[in-house]
Image: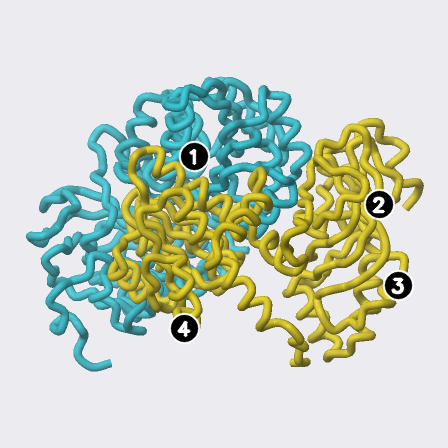
Chain colours: A cyan, B yellow
Amino acid sequence: MSAPRLDDVRQPSPVGLHRVLEPTGVLPQAAWRLDADPQVHADEVRVRVERLNLDAASFRQLWDRHGGDGGAVRAEVAGIIATRGKMHNPVTGSGGMLVGTVEEVGPASRLGLAPADRIATLVSLTLTPLVVTDGLARWDGRSEQVPCDGHAILFGRSIAAHLPRDLPTELALAVMDVCGAPALTHRVVAKYVAQGRPPTVAVIGGAGKSGSLALAAARRAGAARTIAVVPLPTERDLLVPTGLADVVALADARDPVSLSEAVASAGGPADVTVVCVDVPGCEHGAILATADLGTVVFFSMATSFATAALGAEGLAADVTLMIGNGYAAGHADFALDVLRTSPGARTIFETRLASHVGAVHPPR
Amino acid sequence: MSAPRLDDVRQPSPVGLHRVLEPTGVLPQAAWRLDADPQVHADEVRVRVERLNLDAASFRQLWDRHGGDGGAVRAEVAGIIATRGKMHNPVTGSGGMLVGTVEEVGPASRLGLAPADRIATLVSLTLTPLVVTDGLARWDGRSEQVPCDGHAILFGRSIAAHLPRDLPTELALAVMDVCGAPALTHRVVAKYVAQGRPPTVAVIGGAGKSGSLALAAARRAGAARTIAVVPLPTERDLLVPTGLADVVALADARDPVSLSEAVASAGGPADVTVVCVDVPGCEHGAILATADLGTVVFFSMATSFATAALGAEGLAADVTLMIGNGYAAGHADFALDVLRTSPGARTIFETRLASHVGAVHPPR
């Protein structure tokens, strides 16, 4: 590869096209290699990196591949970043996010950041130019949390959130990780309310992180009734005392008949069904649990597009099917605010974070 | 398997659970084997089958597997139907639709059908109980069109459309096959119009069957501007004279930069982008071509849920992402009406149907 294109490009692209080295013409996420040069273009921001949070699927793959050898995991992550100019696991296709401090802000940046701001990036590491300068020396390769030194580049059109001073960093990051769900749930529910018909909302996987925030957001938006569905009595016992849902029902979301009957018994069918469980096969149940002209929002990455589309057709279900977009304007601040004002959601998050403290990934 | 469950079930399920023989408890589409007993339950309808239209992917797989031996293809299709009680290709997972005449209507059916009505079923053959009685003797195994004799069962909650008398059957079936697209496009566009902001609508794949109807439906709903994107000059030359779109742009939908620039040059970005091309990799381009707070409707079965969700997040695109539901109340009649009132759409359909006349599937 000869001279990078940086010198050739007068107008940086807001989505970072000018940082793509190979293959040319694709978006940064699709690129094999990015230019992570520290010099910022007019609309870019450079961040001094403090820590990477690897995507769980990516870390698991690396861990398994190296049989739990932390040193080998560390070497491979360092190698990926050096080779690709980004932390983009070539096997899982996933990345993660990072925490750092703003170092330089281009004059045309509109991200609302200033030097010394402590931030988390909410766009994937798979599209974020990154250089690591300490060889990951402070990381033992045994957890997703990667302390490191280096820099990253944010494009004109990117997403970064200020880390709040009033919440522990771990808690704030966990909230930001799922902040698309409460924002979109609130928006969808509010539309029904604005039309004078406050909806019944069912959240499948209501005891999880995205699920608990979705429940709180639905209530804040004016839902007439909130129903949480969870698969296990332990999750029910965690959720019921929080008061996040009007009713908590037990059902396996992969069993359409069981799921729809559980929602019906809890006061359904739902006008809005929000799927927050990351297991495959929940599409038919979610559709069947939803009323005619209702809406299903799928936040699970295990959702199959074709199963959802053909399932609705096969069930003659006239429902709106939405792909849960992880981004909405102001989503991080909104999610943090939901957490601050919902003791129930905060309990769920703190319980889940505590259960991971000290967890060491077993080789398997 | 012992006595079927029919005798045990007093209340037939509107989605056909009582017809599932194995495994029990799943929906008919997920079942391995259905009970195709001709006796109808209270809310069921029995149809005398005249012809099956196999799904193109299914037929292609069978054709390839048997190296173009029509007799072997016929034997396998007959075998699948006899074994499973439905035409559900176990390799492709797809089915098709059927044409026939209503024979008996249960007293509690609400499908609006009467004996002697000539209809097409719009739910997949993968969930339709079916018996073939003539051994497919009139079919040469060389096309998706399978003339046959037998019966099929429609459930309480199903979809069937009357075949119109004023249109050739082939044309009507081709329209019904994609009738979800114009119905949902119309609904989405009409919402923008009702809010006082008639949208710019881009249809990716505007020269196809679903695309041409989506264009006509968007204009009927009050779109301010319609943009069609097609990949080939031949498609542009087909589409331009029909007047279906205000602008026809050329671009490869798999190239996000090229697609978004084409839409922008044609008067975009689009408030509503409708994806009607069945090739993988169009998600990022469609998102990038869409304005902030706009809507992308994916009708392509080649859409990847994760690519769309993560793509929007990576591009910091605050857009609504919709899975194109193949069903909406009244969708078949609406699509036929769009065709009747849009000479341009009719031209597209007739041209495409004519190009398939006499086409013999080459073995490959």
Q: CA distance from mark 3 to mark 2?
A: 19 Å
- Name the kind of residue labelled 2 in the image: Asp
Quadrant of the image occupied by residue B254: bottom left
**Residues at circles 4 and 1 in contact by the CB criterion of under 8 Å:** no
- Image x and y of residue B257, in percent: 29, 64
**Residues at circles 3 and 2 in contact by the CB criterion of under 8 Å:** no
Query: What residue is pinned by disc 4?
Result: B232
Please tell me the numbered disc located at residue B135.
3
- Name the kind of residue labelled 3 in the image: Gly
Q: Residue at x 81, y 74 (%)?
A: B72
- Name the kind of residue labelled 1 in the image: Lys
Q: CA distance from mark 4 to mark 1?
A: 46 Å
Quick one: label 3 or label 2, which is nearer the N terminus?
2
| Circle 1 crowding by C-alpha within 10 Å: few under 14, some 14–19, many from 20 | many
B217 versus A91 height, above or below: above
Question: Viewed as shown, does residue B123 lie left or right of B82?
Answer: left
Give a yes or no on whether discs 1 and 3 share a subunit: no
Tell me the element at label 3.
Answer: loop
Tell me the element at label 1.
Answer: helix
Select label 4 or label 1 by which is in front: 4
**Residues at circles 1 and 3 in contact by the CB criterion of under 8 Å:** no
Q: CA distance from mark 4 to mark 2?
A: 47 Å
